[in-house]
Image (cartoon, rainbow, N blue to C red):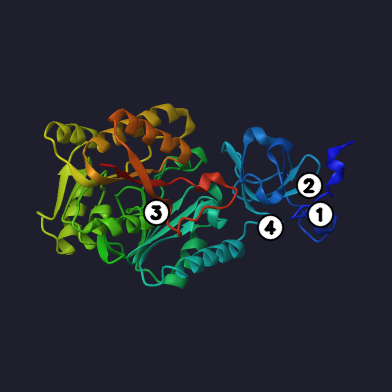
Amino acid sequence: MNNNSRFPRRERAFRDDSRRSSARYYEADADRDTMPRLVVSNERVRDPRISPRWFFDNMVVREENNPRDGAAVLLVDTRGRQVGSAIYNSHSKIRARLFSYECKQWTADYVREAVSNAVQRRLQYFRSDDSMRLIYADADFLPGVVADRLGNVIVIQLLTMAADMMVDVIVDELQTMLKPAGFVLQLGSPLREKEGLAVLPNRQIGEVAPKVWVQQDGFGLYADVIGGQKTGLFLDQRFNRRLLSQWASGRTVLDLFCHVGGWSMSALTQGAAHTVGVDSSADALEMARASAERNNYTPEQAEFIHSDAFDFLDKASDEKQYWDIIVTDPPAFAKNSHVLDSALRGYLSLNYRAMKQLSPGGLLVACSCSQAVREDVFEDCLMTGARNAKMQFQIVARGGQSPDHPILLGFDESRYLKCLVLRRLE
């Protein structure tokens, strides 16, 4: 007797009827038969609603109807089932980037609407603040477009050919909605070369001061929107800094890879007794000191030191210097999976050194912005560091990207920032 026969067969909680009705859906799409298309490997196409959004050249079986660089193509699998619409570039290893599951053209009207929708989503939770990421590329269905509002300036990165071709539309819609004093178009990223685009000097539109004052969570920071790192300010750590603020009062804080002093200013705003910011960029430290002064903090309260973070920790060990809170927030150690092993050694070495300089009961705020490093792997690095330091730690909080850097469900490439708060046990 089959034991399973004693139990009634369970119905699936969720039934996917999208494929059953696909023929009717296709008949309704006027452009489907004439639109350029890419037939992609079935091995990479799962349920169309959660399919991968980047399709590399080795996933393309064939091209039909003469697709044009920077324009839309319809993606279908080898059985003719629709995957969605994507921007196409024959010069890129990423041959197609999905932007809709419907049959759509990449037009000025589409881009204008997508920009408007992205901005409106931000304004729902950042209405009183003038610094936020307005557009986060694929996660906002605008592949290759990144836009940050910093004070009265909007900084835009254009990283795909399709984005580059729509720059006037993007600028016009943002100007209409937000009325900034000016724009900076960042055209110098090496990622542009991979798209067959020219790497150019940054372009300014309107009135743009080289140093912009940006308000955030009760304090301000200067941002270099013309020659600074990335767009001039790292906005993704905003909610993680809020996490730390509940422990900052009366504590000493070491802010490693401090850039323009975001963690330090946040901690001081919440009553930290003393902060030390360390960075290898003299220009960033100049901005950090100017930010501290404008926030009315003295050099005795907010100290900034020009040094390599690893060298600084080694010297602190020799001099037996300890802090109540240490933040490790380095740039990405792993730009891609090919250098993952060396990146993990870097995270282990950095956080092991930091753990050794924590006061008993102190907190380590360990961050990684390497997309190639998964959170569980990063946590393993911290566990190994604690074991090597012969210390016990508790994870008391976890953080990630602030909500203006949304993670698109099913698209892991939009998830990159990890933040763990560890308490050293006495």
Residue under circle 4? 104
Residue under circle 2? 81
Question: Residue drawn 20% across and 35% down?
Answer: 313
**Which percent across, then down, holds residue 340?**
44, 30
Dot in front, 4 or 2: 2
In the rendered image, is residue 335 in sight? no
Question: Residue drawn 71% across and 49% down?
Answer: 48
Foreground residue, 6 or 110?
A: 6
Q: Amino acid at mark 4?
A: Lys
Dot in front, 3 or 2: 3
Q: State whether residue 347 is above or below residue 132.
A: above
Residue under circle 3? 236
Tell me which numbered mark, 3 or 2, is placed earlier along the sequence.
2
User: How far, Cα to Cα, is label 4 from label 2?
Assistant: 16 Å
**Which percent across, then down, holds residue 4?**
83, 41
User: How far, Cα to Cα, is label 2 from label 1?
Assistant: 8 Å
Residue under circle 1? 22
Tell me which numbered mark, 4 or 2, is placed earlier along the sequence.
2
Tell me which numbered mark, 3 or 4, is placed earlier along the sequence.
4
Question: Residue drawn 65% across and 46% down?
Answer: 68
Residue 38 falls in image quadrant? top right
**Which percent across, then down, holds residue 107?**
62, 60
Foreground residue, 272 or 63?
A: 272
Q: Amino acid at mark 1?
A: Ser
**Which percent across, then down, holds residue 179?**
40, 72
Dot in front, 3 or 4: 3
Task: For mark 4, give the secondary structure.
Answer: loop
Task: For mark 2, give the secondary structure.
Answer: loop
Q: Amino acid at mark 3?
A: Asp
Q: Amino acid at mark 2?
A: Arg
